[in-house]
Image: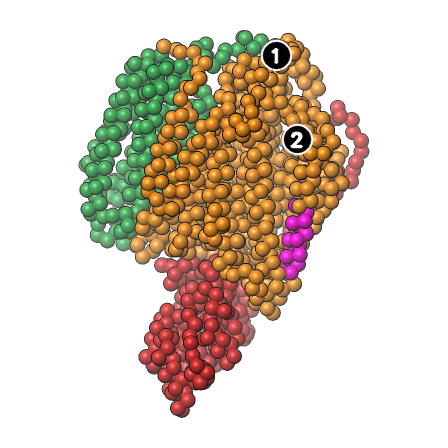
């Protein structure tokens, strides 16, 4: 193979930005570990449920109400749209549109966090994590997911700032942020189904 | 050509010793750090074992109190598994993978440095517990409710320490996967990568899916201990077996995380010391990946005595037997290679022979454990202690010792003493068997494990004394190896590029390799590239023509995932202090957690965010602005 | 190990089959390895990639033969498993065992008999041992009678003891449970039905009342020391349940969960300084004068 160094594109404007750079694969694998973590905690929820004699939720606690959590989840899932827009925009080399998308996502993410905080405060009046295994796994799932949303908001804020110097790394940053963001939203749906719909089954 | 090499040397040079120490991202230096640090932990764990064996040499001995014994046996297991064997194999991976695939660095050089610093920090974090006399004391698998209900910080060092360490392990695994898929030399399609790289790949995928189970378990444990959550207590709707399930869903794949890189080392050495290419390469690669995958389906065999339904246990028994088959493929592939070759009986190969003998014994006793009623009789006895030492020491330590002797010439540029090597092999082999073989018998005679002492007149006395004597012999063997290594890195004969006539790419460059590994990126056309002399001569000619030299900065190539076709040139980051700073920030966070200081923990969180920002900030950016 | 019960006999047979099989496999592997190591013809480097014993050998030795052997082993497993698992319909007597740090609390639901660290069973009768834990996970293991069974809080597990012949069988806790895990043993005594029935009836009866003044004094020492907070002696005011039941202490083979023999000297040492024998266990030292101790020992020795 005769290969002149000059003939190979540098990871620069000649190489297509839609290609999957190493950092993209790195984020995919990070998502794999986090997804496994959530999968195991959801499995733990069902394990505890099926090992419990008597009803679930236990001790006569009512099934969790679904309307407000459904709205909260919907807000978060909706935020995938501006992020997808941002990701598309960097592909097309339009940083200002990307910044708008990121800002929109951050706004909806923060709205979710505030809403979630209020919901948790309200439900703490009815049952606390220290009460029993049901409470413990319930708040663990919600808390861990919320922590991931916080990380997502921080990541998106960084990506937004990073687009001010719009180079390949900025493009990659927005793309991996979007990947992560979609992942956290999928987890939100799974947790909603687990905590709020499954007990009714 | 000379001008090109000068440019490479300039671009890859490291400023000064202090800066290098703090900021290096050179995978070879990081690899050596892992190897050395893991070796220190090995010696510590070995000393812990010597203390245990001294206590158990005679019945009703009072050398160690039960408190001391419980901390020592727990730390022995924790250190060996978490702080020695996996980081050691990670060290080999770090040093060798880029060299073996013809690259100049790992995919994420700073993440690599970060992984090492976190390993060091979490190891020190865990060991500070021993210094404080508050080491974890519920065994390396830390069953609840003994652990969850224990007072004092001992168990928190375990729960928090392992979450901390898991960050390093995961980072390393992600790095290896992306590196092996994306940065191979042109022409090195997947069916041509060294078997060691297949092993690292299988291991890394296992890590990605197994470590979260341990982290989840430790999270639930710490929430229970610190914040009064209930997961493990029947009275509040929990289940003590939940800990065991989550632990072994990690724990069984973990033994393959330990075993697979070690057999990768074996697959590296056997062809070279038989001077014959590996038989059934495809089957061995397949067996490696299959073992990693199947390893997730057998965990319940660690729980056969807890009272599970027969149907459940039977399924896992079948799976546990099935997983012996990929190992069988590997053993017979090695034997076939040896039979068809011309064995070179030098020290590295002696350790491989020792590995085969010891590991087969361990594997056979392991298959016995799949037979549920037999397992129910001998689990938690010294028979299982014998079994797992045979598979772990045989299956991992012997290959590690082989690998150390095999690659020492490449890493240091000098040869070890062959005579001392042979002597050390026999001391280790005899010492190991004398220590652990009697344990099969004491287990069958009813001696339970994790006991700080045992009564007289049980028929266990002589067996225990033999084990203790064996332990001393084994320790001597390890000492001799350490002396041999230290001596030879100073005074050994010059090794040259390729003292072993080896087949993989690391032997095509100098010993030790230059910072940039290869003056020109090699082009590969078989699974034994260093035996393809014409291709290696062609590399030389390419260097003279200035092709694939990539001397403008830290550059290497990115190639396609399956066929390794050239895609583009990668600009790699150079030295950076941020990995160390981020590791320090994380340490502050974990110290805050263990000392129950919210202020410290929050400062740690803030420091982490700042360090992440500093790491990714484009301080010096030579990237082109796109819009 | 002699098989004193059916399940252990099954397990022993399995062991010998596997041991012989393993020895054969090991010998074959070592022989092949020796063949490889001893054949040392010089072969030129170009020959490094020549064909030789290859994939076929690996597939036969590494896949086909192991598959056959493992399938056979699996069949043996499935056959043996029911023999060593609790078949609850077939048992004719139940014993409740509660594992505690670091002793075994034994009771017989049929008549309320209560003892500690010793289980009696009639020879030839399958007995359902029902185990649970009051604190952490333990494991009941009497290797001569059956496999081990984990003793888990919040859950009741079962193991069947069916002794073929009379004897005293030692068991020990087999799951690490804390500081004195090493000293948490017990004895299982298999005896003829008549003797067993007599023993069982005696265990259900209250403690023999003190027969003379010295024994009265001894009982007084016990009731006025801290003993009654943890120990029960049926028929007296000592009703503690934290420690082992002492009602028929003198009838037992051992003390402190089969750690020391049941003799006057050891009993004295135990009462005065339990931490010396089992450091970290829950029993504090008891300060007694010489005469107090002697009377107490006399009383305890009267508790048959």
Question: From the viewer's perspective, is residue B332 above or below residue C231?
Answer: above
Residue for point 62% across, 10% down = B3
- Which chain is depicted orange? B
Real-space Cα separation, disc 1 to disc 2, in angstroms: 25 Å
The reply to whether residue A13 is in sight is yes
Pointers 1 and 2 in contact (CB under 8 A)?
Answer: no
Residue C242's x, y, as percent?
Answer: 37, 69
Residue for point 44% across, 34% down = B583
Residue A188, picture quadrant: top left
Is B469 magenta? The answer is yes
> Dot 1, how many residues are within 10 Å of its Cα: few (below 14), some (14-19), or many (20+)?
some
Our reading of the magenta stretch's main secondary structure is: helix
Colour representing chain C:
red
Colour representing chain A:
green
Element marked by disc 2? helix
Residue B4 numbered tag: 1
Residue B258's x, y, as percent?
Answer: 55, 41
The numbered mark, 1 or 2, whose residue comes first in the sequence reads 1
Q: Identify the subunit bearing mark 2.
A: B
Residue for point 60% across, 58% down = B54
Residue B468's x, y, as percent?
Answer: 64, 57
Region of the chain picked out in magenta, as a range: B464-478
Question: From the viewer's perspective, is residue A142 above or below residue C304?
Answer: above
What residue did someone put label 2 on? B412
């Amino acid at each position: 193979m005769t290969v002149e160094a000059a003939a190979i594109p540098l990871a620069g404007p000649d190489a297509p930005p839609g290609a999957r750079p190493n950092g993209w694969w790195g984020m995919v694998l990070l998502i794999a570990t986090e997804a496994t973590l959530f999968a195991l905690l959801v499995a733990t929820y069902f394990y505890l449920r099926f090992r419990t004699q008597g009803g679930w939720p236990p001790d006569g606690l009512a099934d969790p109400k679904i309307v407000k959590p459904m709205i909260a989840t919907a807000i978060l899932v909706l935020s995938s749209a501006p992020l997808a827009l941002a990701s598309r925009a960097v592909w097309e080399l339009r940083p200002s549109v990307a910044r708008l998308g990121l800002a929109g996502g951050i706004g909806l993410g923060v709205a979710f966090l505030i809403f979630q905080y209020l919901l948790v405060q309200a439900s703490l009046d009815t049952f606390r994590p220290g009460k029993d295994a049901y409470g413990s796994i319930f708040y663990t799932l919600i808390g861990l997911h919320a922590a991931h949303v916080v990380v997502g908001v921080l990541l998106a804020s960084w990506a937004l700032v990073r687009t001010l110097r719009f180079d390949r790394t900025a493009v990659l940053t927005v793309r991996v942020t979007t990947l992560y963001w979609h992942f956290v939203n999928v987890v939100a749906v799974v947790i909603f189904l687990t905590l709020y719909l499954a007990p009714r089954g | 050509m000379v001008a090109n090499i000068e440019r490479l040397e300039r671009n890859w040079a490291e400023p000064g010793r202090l800066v290098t120490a703090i900021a290096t991202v050179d995978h070879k230096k990081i690899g050596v750090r892992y190897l050395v640090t893991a070796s220190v932990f090995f010696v510590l764990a070995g000393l812990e074992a010597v203390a245990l064996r001294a206590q158990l040499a005679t019945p009703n001995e009072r050398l160690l109190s039960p408190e001391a014994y419980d901390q020592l046996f727990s730390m022995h297991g924790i250190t060996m598994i978490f702080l020695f064997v996996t980081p050691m194999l990670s060290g080999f991976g770090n040093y060798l993978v880029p060299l073996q695939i013809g690259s100049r660095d790992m995919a994420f050089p700073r993440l690599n440095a970060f992984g090492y610093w976190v390993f060091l920090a979490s190891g020190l974090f865990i060991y500070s517990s021993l210094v404080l006399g508050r080491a974890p004391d519920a065994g390396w698998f830390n069953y609840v409710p003994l652990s969850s209900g224990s007072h004092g910080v001992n168990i928190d060092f375990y729960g928090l320490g392992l979450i901390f360490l898991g960050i390093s392990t995961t980072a390393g695994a992600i790095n290896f996967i992306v590196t092996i898929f994306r940065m191979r030399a042109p022409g090195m399609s997947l069916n041509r990568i060294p078997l060691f790289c297949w092993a690292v790949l299988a291991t890394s995928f296992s890590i990605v899916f197994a470590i979260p189970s341990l982290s989840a378990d430790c999270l639930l444990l710490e929430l229970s201990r610190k914040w009064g959550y209930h997961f493990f207590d029947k009275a509040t709707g929990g289940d003590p077996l939940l800990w065991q399930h989550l632990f072994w869903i990690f724990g069984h794949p973990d033994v393959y995380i330990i075993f697979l890189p070690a057999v990768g080392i074996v697959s590296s050495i056997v062809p070279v010391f038989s001077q014959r290419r590996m038989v059934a390469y495809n089957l061995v690669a397949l067996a490696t990946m299959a073992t990693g995958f199947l390893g997730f389906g057998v965990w319940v065999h660690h729980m056969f005595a807890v009272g599970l339904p027969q149907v459940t246990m039977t399924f896992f028994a079948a799976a546990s037997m099935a997983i012996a088959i990929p190992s069988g493929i590997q053993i017979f592939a090695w034997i076939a290679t040896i039979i068809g070759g011309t064995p070179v009986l030098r020290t590295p190969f002696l350790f491989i022979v020792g590995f085969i003998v010891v590991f087969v014994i361990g594997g056979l006793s392991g298959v016995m454990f799949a037979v549920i009623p037999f397992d129910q009789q001998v689990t938690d006895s010294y028979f299982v202690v014998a079994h797992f030492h045979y598979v772990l020491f045989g299956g991992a330590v012997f290959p590690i010792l082989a690998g150390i002797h095999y690659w020492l010439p490449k890493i240091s540029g000098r040869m070890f003493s062959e005579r001392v090597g042979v002597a050390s092999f026999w001391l280790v082999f005899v010492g190991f068997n004398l220590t652990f073989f009697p344990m099969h018998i004491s287990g069958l005679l009813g001696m339970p494990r994790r006991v700080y002492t045992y009564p007289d007149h049980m028929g266990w006395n002589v067996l225990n004394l033999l084990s203790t004597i064996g332990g001393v012999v084994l320790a001597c063997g390890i000492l001799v190896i350490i002396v041999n290594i230290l001596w030879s890195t100073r005074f050994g004969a010059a090794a040259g590029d390729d003292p072993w006539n080896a087949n993989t790419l690391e032997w095509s460059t100098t010993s030790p390799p230059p910072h940039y590994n290869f003056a020109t990126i090699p082009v590969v056309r078989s699974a034994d590239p260093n035996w393809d002399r014409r291709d290696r001569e062609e590399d030389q000619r390419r260097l003279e023509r200035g092709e694939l030299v990539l001397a403008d900065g830290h550059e290497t190539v990115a190639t396609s995932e399956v066929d390794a076709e050239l895609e583009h040139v990668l600009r790699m980051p150079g030295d950076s202090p941020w990995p160390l700073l981020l590791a320090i920030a994380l340490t502050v966070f974990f110290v805050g957690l263990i000392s129950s200081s919210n202020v410290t923990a929050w400062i740690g969180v803030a420091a982490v965010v700042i360090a992440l920002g500093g790491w990714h900030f484009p301080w010096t950016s030579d990237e082109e602005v796109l819009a | 190990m002699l098989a004193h019960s059916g399940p252990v006999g099954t397990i022993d047979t399995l062991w010998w089959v596997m041991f012989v099989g393993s020895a054969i496999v090991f010998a074959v592997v070592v022989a092949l390895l020796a063949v490889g190591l001893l054949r040392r013809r010089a072969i030129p480097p170009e020959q490094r990639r020549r064909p030789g014993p290859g994939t076929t050998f690996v597939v036969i030795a590494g896949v086909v033969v192991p598959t056959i052997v493992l399938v056979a082993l699996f069949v043996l497993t499935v056959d043996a498993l029911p023999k060593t698992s609790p078949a609850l319909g077939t048992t004719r007597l139940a014993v409740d065992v509660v594992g505690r740090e670091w002793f075994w609390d034994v009771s017989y639901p049929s008549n309320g008999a209560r003892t500690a660290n010793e289980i009696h069973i009639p020879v030839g009768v399958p007995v359902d041992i029902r185990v649970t834990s009051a604190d952490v996970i333990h494991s009941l293991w009497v290797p001569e009678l059956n496999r081990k069974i984990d003793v888990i809080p919040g859950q009741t597990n079962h193991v069947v003891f069916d002794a073929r012949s009379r004897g005293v069988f030692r068991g020990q806790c087999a799951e690490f449970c804390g500081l004195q895990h090493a000293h948490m043993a017990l004895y299982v005594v298999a005896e003829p039905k008549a003797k067993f029935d007599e023993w069982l009836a005696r265990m259900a009866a209250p403690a023999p009342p003190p027969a003379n003044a010295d024994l009265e004094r001894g009982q007084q020492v016990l009731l006025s020391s801290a003993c009654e907070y943890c120990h029960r002696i049926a028929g007296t005011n000592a009703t503690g349940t934290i420690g082992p039941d002492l009602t028929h202490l003198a009838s037992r083979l051992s003390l402190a969960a089969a750690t020391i023999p049941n003799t006057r000297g050891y009993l004295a040492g135990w009462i005065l300084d339990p931490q010396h024998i089992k450091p970290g266990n829950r029993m504090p030292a008891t300060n007694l004068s010489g005469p107090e101790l002697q009377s107490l020992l006399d009383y305890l020795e009267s508790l048959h």
